[in-house]
Image: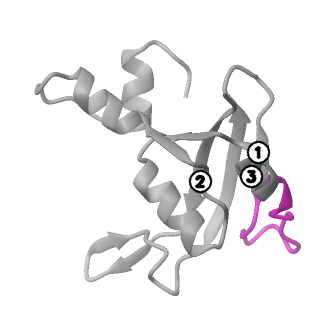
Amino acid sequence: MRALVLDLETTVTDIGGKSDNTPFNPNNKLVSAHFAWLGQREVTHLVFYHNEKAIPDSSEPLEKALQEADMLIAHNAKFDVGWLNACGFTIPPKVRCTMVNEYILAKGQRAELSLKKVAERRNKAT
């Protein structure tokens, strides 16, 4: 099974003091994608929108990887899959969310679920 690990970064719009990072807000943009095959160290970094980058990277490497993947792994996968859908990318047949996994492993105890806090608990670099 080929599992693709993905993290997307987006812009955030302030609406009445609340942060909105959804793809449904026309002011928000997909900034970058960072992905690698599970078990491999080589990470691909693509930048689609940034003030310091006049020409965006091609989205083709991401689309190709998504088409080849049997599974997508992401922290807060509903966010990443929402953006992938909104941008017209292929979604692999299986999706796993590490945030949901952490919630389950906390066994009903309050635990910070941000990727940074999860990595710190598990002694991994973010």
Span highlighted in magenta in the image: 47-61
Circle nearer the N terminus (1, 2): 2
- Up/down of 85 relative to 68, above or below: below
| Cα separation between marks 3 and 2 | 17 Å
Pointer 2 residue: 8
Residue lying furthest bottom: 26
**Residue 68 — which label?**
1
Amino acid found under the numbered disc labelled 2: Leu
Quarter occupied by the N terminus? top right
Apparent side of residue 111 relative to residue 115 in the rendered image (left or right): left
Apparent side of residue 90 relative to residue 102 in the rendered image (left or right): right
| Label 3 neighbour load within 10 Å: few <14, some 14-19, many 20+ | some
Q: Given this view, does label 1 or label 2 mark the residue nearer the observer?
A: 1
| Label 2 neighbour load within 10 Å: few <14, some 14-19, many 20+ | many
Apparent side of residue 33 relative to residue 60 in the rendered image (left or right): left
Pointer 3 residue: 67
Circle nearer the N terminus (3, 2): 2
Label 2 secondary element = strand
